[in-house]
Image: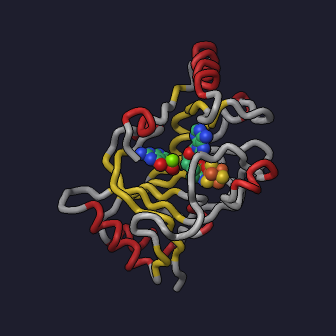
């Protein structure tokens, strides 16, 4: 039985992608295989534009959860007295830790599951919604799912090479940072010329929620 290192768990609205606006418990796992999370390592990391603190277990409800039942119980408690619980597993890279036992624990409690992943790891079976966000220069083993959400632009990752992968939805998400105005304009320009793609805005940052 494995334990889980969790940075934070919180109730919010899904801010991105095709499920934007939906009430969700966000389960953010600690750690990532493409960056240590330390600023001094960012410039040499495999993924250099990350907008997230996933180091340690010190956020809201962050802890080392001893087993799948304990973690699933916490998610259900944060969902509260409402029907149809929905969890978004993210990180860090959630698929370094999400396993069959955790998916089974969610299923046993009637929790619908979604994952945000960088696509370098093979997921366990049974996740209800898979969002893959590929990173340039990495080996993407997960080329199927519900939505492919490409942070834009990424030199070395051409959308034309991704559009034949097995996804229902293809999204460009403007890279946040010092050039958000430029990356947004560039994404809009690309989509106007390539209508198979649609825009994913990080709405939580606009409306001031987590
Ligand atoms: C923090 S990541 C965690 C999940 C997983 N490691 C991944 O990269 O998909 C969550 C989402 O935020 C996106 N993201 C990270 N940094 C971003 C940035 N600076 N601008 C826009 N999206 C970003 C990722 O590509 C991913 O879709
Ligand atoms: N509201 C909200 N929506 C999100 N969608 C994906 C997120 C992530 O960090 O994975 C995220 C996040 O951090 N907050
Ligand atoms: S893969 Fe995801 S969590 Fe890891 S550094 Fe990149 S955006 Fe951040
Ligand atoms: Mg985020």
Residue at figure coordinates x 59%, y 46% from the top left: 51
Location of residue 160 in the rendering, given as x and y in whole percent from the top left corner: 72, 28
Q: Is residue 68 left or right of residue 21?
A: right
Q: Is residue 94 left or right of residue 66?
A: right
Q: Residue furthest left?
A: 81
Looking at the image, is 60 positioned above or below residue 202? below
Closer-to-camera residue (134/175) = 175
Q: Quadrant of residue 62?
A: bottom left
Q: Quadrant of residue 162?
A: top right
**Number of marks in the rendered image:** 0
Residue at figure coordinates x 54%, y 82% from the top left: 2
Closer-to-camera residue (44/156) = 44
Location of residue 191 in the rendering, given as x and y in whole percent from the top left corner: 59, 19
Q: Is residue 138 left or right of residue 173?
A: right
Residue at figure coordinates x 52%, y 27% from the top left: 199
Residue at figure coordinates x 64%, y 31% from the top left: 178
Location of residue 71 in the rendering, given as x and y in whole percent from the top left corner: 40, 74
Its colouring scheme is secondary structure
């Amino acid at each position: 039985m494995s334990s889980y290192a969790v940075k934070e768990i919180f109730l919010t609205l899904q801010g991105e992608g095709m499920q934007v606006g939906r009430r969700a418990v966000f389960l953010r796992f600690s750690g990532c295989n493409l960056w240590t999370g330390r600023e001094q390592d960012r410039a040499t990391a495999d993924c250099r534009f990350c907008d997230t603190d996933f180091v340690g277990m010190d956020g809201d409800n962050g802890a080392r959860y001893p087993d799948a039942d304990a973690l699933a119980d916490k998610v259900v408690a944060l969902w509260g007295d409402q029907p149809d619980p929905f969890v978004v597993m993210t990180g860090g890279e959630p698929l370094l830790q999400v396993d069959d036992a955790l998916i089974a624990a969610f299923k046993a409690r009637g929790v619908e599951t979604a994952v945000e992943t960088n696509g370098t790891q093979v997921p366990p079976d049974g996740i209800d919604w898979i969002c893959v966000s590929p990173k340039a220069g990495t080996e993407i083993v997960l080329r199927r799912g519900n939505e492919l959400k490409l942070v834009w632009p990424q030199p070395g990752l051409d959308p034309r090479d991704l559009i034949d992968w097995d996804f229902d939805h293809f999204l460009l998400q403007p890279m946040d940072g010092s050039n958000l105005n430029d990356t947004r304009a560039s994404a809009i320009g690309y989509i106007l010329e390539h209508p198979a793609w649609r825009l994913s805005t990080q709405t939580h940052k606009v409306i001031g929620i987590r």
